[in-house]
Amino acid sequence: MSENLVEISKMSFQHENGRTVFKDVDITIPRGKITAVMGPSGTGKTTLLRLIGGQLTPTQGKVLVDGQLIHKLNRNDLYQLRKRMGMLFQSGGLFTHLSVYENVAFPLREHTRLSESMIHTLVLMKLQMVGLRGAAHLMPTELSGGMARRVALARAIGLDPKLIMYDEPFTGQDPISLGVLVKLIRTLNDALGLTSIIVSHDVKETLSIADYVYIISDRQIIGQGTPESISQNSSLQLQQFIQGLPDGPVPFDYPAPLLQQDFLERTDK
Amino acid sequence: MLSQRFIESLVGLFLIFALIALSVLAFKVSGLTSLFPSASYDVTANFDEIGGLKVRAPVKIGGVQIGEVSKIMLDPVTFKAVVTLHIEKQYNDIPDDSSVTILTAGLLGDNYVAVTPMYSKTALKSGSQILYTNSAMVLEKLIGQLIYKIGNGSGDKSSDKHQGSE
Amino acid sequence: MISRLAAVGAWGIDNLRDIGKAGILFYRVLISPPNIRKGFPLVMQQIYVEGVLSLLIIVVSSLFIGMVLALQGYHTLAKFGASQELGPLVALSVARELGPVVTAILFAGRAGSAVTAEIALMKATEQLSSMEMMAVDPLRRVISPRFWGGFISMPLLTMIFNATAIYGAYLVGVKWLGLDAGVFWSNMQSSVEFQADIINGIWKSVVFGMAVTLIAVVQGYSAEPTSAGIATATTRSVVYSSLAVLGLDFVLTAMMIGSW
């Protein structure tokens, strides 16, 4: 059993329309730890999760999950591997026609033949872990955003996966929900022995619980390390991102012709 | 969401409605008398002219349907139409010297085969051939004959007016 | 000029690619039928949603269509003194053409659009992705049951349509316009053949069912995950289905015309 649950080596990925998202990227995700992948919007962080989950195939390089090349597996093996992974989507991805209880029970019903009473116990246990046992009978449309995400989290840990991936879990949450989520991610990771990957651009929250951080920008990894070493890193690019400076290596102004030219043209007409 | 049981019963009801509809369509609308093709035997008859007779046209005795036309072929030697009649087994004592005619249902209706039973003691069997046949009346020929008769009756004019199409 | 030609070419290739994707989806839906234990209740549920819940519109429409057909038919036939042929007129029109075609178009509008919207919305809210990541094949769980539900419901709805329309014609022709019931039914029975007319009509509805449900499912699955995308997919599903039904009707009628 290798120390790293996920190993991405020399991976490049290009979309069908030609846009390169990653070029020669190396990422390792150690077991039992929380690894964060951060970067400006649109750098392909969600694409990375889909590559790890086997929904996309890299144009070059390897993606090894638990020792297996996930993009080369056939359908059955892929599904077997996916049962040991959980993914939390940005919008929760709850099934709107099922109640909270049924949503959390879904993976159990699909992949196991446990009796109803066992499922009942397990579902309530998972809901208790996220603090929503009392909401079991509600429908997803009746939940707030934060609660929906917690239910999705309960569903994602339904089969006791080894790896859990969070796609922008902190985006758009109020301070209390943020606090709840941060606590949950850390506690679950440690209590259940999970390996967590958080994809986010919320610097403060992510750095507070991550064990290791990768920062991706412009198809490359521009920085990696523990949260302390990242905050002290002197690279301009990193510092602009970490501190949220409006101008720097990523410019404020979108490329445009000279100011005088633009204004003059208008007065000419 | 309604319970699974309830949904299944509703689907079952739906299925039953559809089957009832189908049986109504079968029996009341199309007059299906039995789902299974009844036992029958085949006899043939040769005609000079079958007019508009089609396959599946009814075969009747005295207006009561006893079977249907199953095949129409041309004999390559005699150039007569060989019509195969499919007759239900229950009508198995039709005298074998009966005659068949092709009639029209109503004035402008479809053609059908009418069997006129005679007096022989032996009955038609599978494969028998009916020897006494009367061809269908083609309207044009009838008109031609009529005009010919009228023409002849009123003097010497008419050979040109002979409209018969042979 | 050249760029316009290139644009036409690109449009053609895009359409071809879409048809190819639809074909692949069709193939995958056919070869991955919902498995018996888990899938059967799913298909049941879809038959309920697509079939049973469409009964209202089908029955009401067919009743009115039958009644109107009888009304119009009677007045025209009466001019030729042929009002006793009203039975065959209605029965043959409904069984051969109106039944399968109108049912299919109504079904496309009601159930087809609902299926498209549902699948498109599930795609947009990442429900299908979540299913995939939970190692559940969305094709088996979501798409295939909806396809089979529609495929099974269509012929059943058509049978009910046919019967109700003819009943509507009976109500108008016999009860209101005063035709003789015996003549009505017996003329109908002698003109309508079970094998050639009724069963052929039902074959048509089977083919239409396949086409309509396939188009609905494909449009939903390939919709853009935006609100505009869902709207486009839904309207496309109804329009394409209706056109496909009419086109297929011509082809099938031409093929079946021999026995008529």
Image (tube, coloured by chain):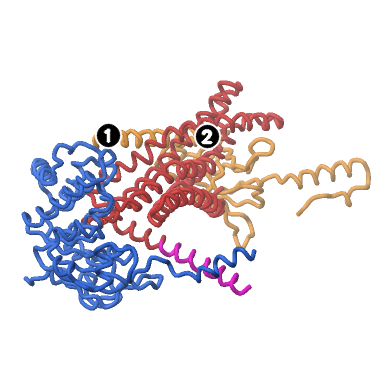
Q: Which residues are magenta?
A: C1-21
Q: Chain of mark 2?
A: C
Please give the letter of the chain rendered in blue: A
Residue A78 or residue C223, whichever sits in front = C223
| Residue A115 appearing in the image | no
Q: For chain B, give the colour.
A: orange
The x and y percentages for residue A110 are 18, 51
| Residue B13 appearing in the image | yes
Q: CA distance from mark 2 to mark 1?
A: 42 Å
Image quarter where the C terminus of chain A lies is bottom right
Look at the numbered disc 2 and give the secondary structure of its residue.
Answer: helix
Is residue B106 rendered to the left or right of residue C193? Answer: right
Q: Label 2: which residue?
A: C189
Is residue A255 rendered to the left or right of residue B71? Answer: left
Please give the letter of the chain rendered in red: C
Which residue is pictured at 53% across the width and 37% down the height? Answer: B65
In the rendered image, residue C8 lying in the magenta stretch gets the answer yes
Which residue is pictured at 38% across the width and 33% down the height? Answer: B17
